[in-house]
């Protein structure tokens, strides 16, 4: 019989120390924070010491997270939306420099083995300065290896020239606009002795040691991405309490879930809700507007926030701003999507949905009751939308995003032991 003791030395197995992972979220919108929280919660706490790093502005919406939160600054959401609406650069050089300093402060305090970022572009600088592996979570349509169609979003040239002429102008000037957006980050990189990563948003949004696509490859394909780019699948999240009026919802009546999120227009949402109600539909509307008084009026049930996955499952149609968060909630329930996008990210997502025939699009700048009514009649009269949405639902179920993210983390930890054991910062905070 073998003894666990030999020459006075114990050989009882020792549990390896947990790996410290900092998950950074850029809180310009709820979607980035919710996606980061969902990924962080998918990690095994027995093996990973997870910390969430973000501006706390949306954290009151979540229940107990299960890990510590460290506050950093994010520019105000209304400032970010204003810049989007006017096609201005998203960040200034001064803002990104401040971001880098805050990133480094948190890294110096916790000495992570790996950092994960959801739209925290400054990690392209700070993680490299600290000498820690960095994984960026983004959408595949922002990959340099994707081939999206760039439709002109709701920017001033559309109002000035109309969508058709504005599209031609946008196609001509888009490379210059993207280069202008990329200038600030490249300038900050050069200030710290790092090379520029290219003057294009696709390179800026996906630049990392590892790039993780929060999409289905069947829906948003890429062409021969490198090995450090990989799909983890849609990050589907849902929160919010069921409102008191939920139990009074009627069965066997056409139902729509209407949400424009934290970045959409509440006026468009109200117009859509009233149009659907006039068509005889039962409407569930989430406004993300704290001034809204919850209640049921004229077939419309309203609440500041609704549990999105439950609402999408209850609905026959989801009408949203076209952002990936609401779209994937709808698809996870097998429900077709009518997107009314405003910014470029939303237009990109909805173009892939339209091509897959799981939904349709109305431009936010021209959306009217008549166009909404026409689109709803068309979608409700065709089984194709439901068939394609159900196909994507089945693929989301099979993809198991949480398990894929966990496997990715395990692979990195196991394949880079020397880096994880011996990384040292090259620049202090």
Image (tube, rainbow, N blue to C red):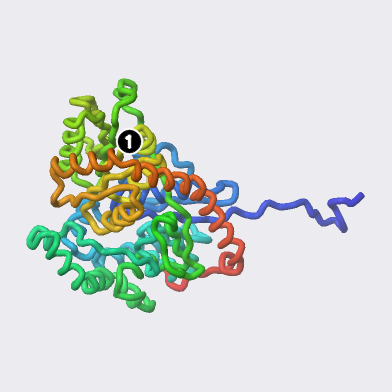
* Residue 106 vs residue 15, the one in the foreground: 15
Quarter of the picture holding the C terminus: bottom left
In the rendered image, which quarter is residue 257 located in? top left
**Mark 1 crowdedness (10 Å alpha carbons): few <14, some 14-19, many ≥20:** many
- Reading the image, the residue beneath label 1 is 316
Is residue 73 at all visible to an observer of this figure?
no
Residue that sits furthest to the right in the current view: 1
Q: Residue at x 34, y 39 (%)?
A: 60
Left or right position of 266 against 389: left
Q: Position of residue 50 (x, y in %)?
A: 50, 51
Left or right position of 36 against 298: right
Q: Position of residue 131 (x, y in %)?
A: 48, 69
In the rendered image, which quarter is residue 171 located in? bottom left
Residue that sits furthest to the top in the current view: 248
Give above or below for 70 relative to 157.
Answer: above
Q: Position of residue 117 (x, y in %)?
A: 41, 58
* Residue 351 vs residue 62, the one in the foreground: 351
Is residue 374 at all visible to an observer of this figure?
yes
Q: Residue at x 46, y 56 (%)?
A: 22
């Amino acid at each position: 019989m073998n003894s666990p003791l030999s020459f006075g030395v114990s050989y009882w197995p020792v549990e390896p120390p947990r790996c410290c992972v900092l998950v950074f979220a850029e809180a310009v919108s709820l979607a980035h924070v919710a996606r980061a929280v969902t990924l962080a919660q998918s990690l095994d706490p027995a093996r990973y010491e997870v910390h969430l790093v973000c501006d706390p502005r949306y954290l009151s919406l979540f229940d107990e997270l299960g890990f510590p939160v460290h506050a950093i600054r994010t520019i105000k959401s209304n400032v970010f939306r204003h810049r989007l609406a006017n096609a201005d650069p998203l960040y200034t050089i001064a803002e990104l420099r401040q971001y880098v300093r805050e990133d480094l402060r948190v890294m110096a305090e916790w000495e992570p083995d790996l950092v994960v970022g959801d739209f925290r572009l400054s990690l392209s600088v700070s993680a490299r300065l600290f000498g820690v592996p960095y994984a960026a979570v983004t959408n595949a349509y922002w990959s340099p290896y994707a081939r999206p169609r760039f439709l002109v979003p709701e920017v001033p040239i559309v109002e000035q020239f109309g969508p058709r002429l504005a599209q031609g102008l946008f196609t001509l000037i888009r490379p210059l606009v993207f280069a202008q957006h990329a200038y600030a980050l490249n300038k900050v990189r050069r200030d710290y002795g790092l090379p520029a990563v290219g003057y294009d948003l696709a390179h800026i949004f996906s630049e990392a040691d590892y790039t993780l696509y929060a999409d289905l490859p069947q829906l948003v394909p890429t062409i021969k991405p490198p090995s450090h780019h990989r799909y983890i699948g849609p990050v589907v999240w849902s929160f919010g309490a069921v409102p008191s009026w939920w139990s009074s919802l009627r069965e066997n009546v056409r139902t729509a879930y209407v949400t424009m999120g934290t970045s959409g227009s509440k006026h468009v949402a109200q117009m859509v809700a009233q149009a659907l109600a006039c068509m005889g539909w039962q409407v569930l509307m989430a406004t993300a507007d704290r001034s809204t008084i919850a209640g049921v009026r004229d077939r419309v049930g309203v609440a500041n926030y609704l549990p999105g996955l439950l609402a999408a499952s209850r609905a026959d149609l989801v009408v949203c701003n076209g952002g990936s968060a609401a779209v994937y909630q709808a698809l996870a329930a097998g429900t077709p999507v009518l997107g009314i996008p405003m910014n470029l990210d939303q237009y990109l997502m909805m173009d892939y949905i339209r091509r897959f025939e799981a939904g349709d699009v109305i431009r936010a700048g021209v959306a009217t009751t008549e166009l909404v009514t026409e689109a709803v009649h068309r979608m409700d009269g065709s089984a194709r939308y439901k068939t394609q949405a159900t196909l994507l639902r089945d693929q989301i179920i099979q993809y198991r995003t949480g398990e894929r993210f966990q496997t990715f983390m395990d692979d990195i930890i196991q394949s880079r032991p020397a880096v994880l054991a011996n990384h040292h910062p090259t620049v202090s905070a």
